[in-house]
Image: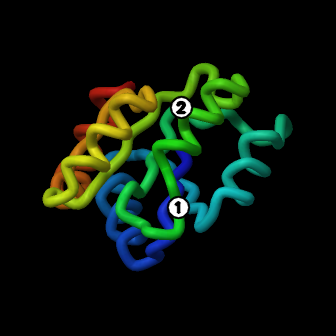
Amino acid sequence: MLALVPDLLFGSRVQGALEPAGHQLELLGDEDRLRARLADRELPAAGVLIVDLTDAQLDGAALVEALRGEGALAGIATLGFYSHVDAAARERAERAGFDLVVPRSRMAREGAQLVARLG
């Protein structure tokens, strides 16, 4: 499983919520690292991609939409999280084709269950 979460502190919280449930999570801090990881055919395929939709420097919705168009997300479910006060971010992510979009607080609380739901 991959996570594009530039905020390393929150990324660690997500990782801490998922690992006790047996999920292996690779934290990636930027788009270039994600693209490189998706292109690396020698590494095992990710089943889920988690994307931070709260980062002002990252347009996660546009990125996922582009990656889907390029075929880079074949067989990979997408889970985005947004600030609960930013309904526009949620709507953009849903239009971009995310499989599941949840508030950031829910991601921290229910990460393992959300991933299992996509599973």
**Percent x, y of residue 109:** 17, 57
Left or right: 86 as drawn, with respect to 77: left
Residue beneath the point at 23% across and 60% down: 83
Residue beneath the point at 57% across and 56% down: 26
Pick the quarter of the image with the C terminus.
top left
Pick whichever, 81 or 86, lies toward us. 86
Residue beneath the point at 72% across and 27% down: 70
User: How many other residues sit within 10 Å of disc 1, few (<14), some (14-19) or many (≥20)?
Assistant: some
Pick whichever, 13 or 90, lies toward us. 90
Pick whichever, 18 or 20, lies toward us. 18
Q: Mark 2 vs mark 1: which is more N-terminal?
A: 2
Q: In this view of the protein, can residue 36 be seen by the observer? A: yes
Three-letter amino acid code at the position of disc 2 = Gly
Element type at mark 1: loop
Three-letter amino acid code at the position of disc 1 = Leu
Left or right: 112 as drawn, with respect to 69: left
Q: Which residue is mark 1?
A: 58
**Percent x, y of residue 80:** 37, 45
Residue beneath the point at 55% across and 33% down: 65
Q: Which residue is mark 2?
A: 47
**Percent x, y of residue 28:** 60, 62
User: How many other residues sit within 10 Å of disc 2, few (<14), some (14-19) or many (≥20)?
Assistant: some
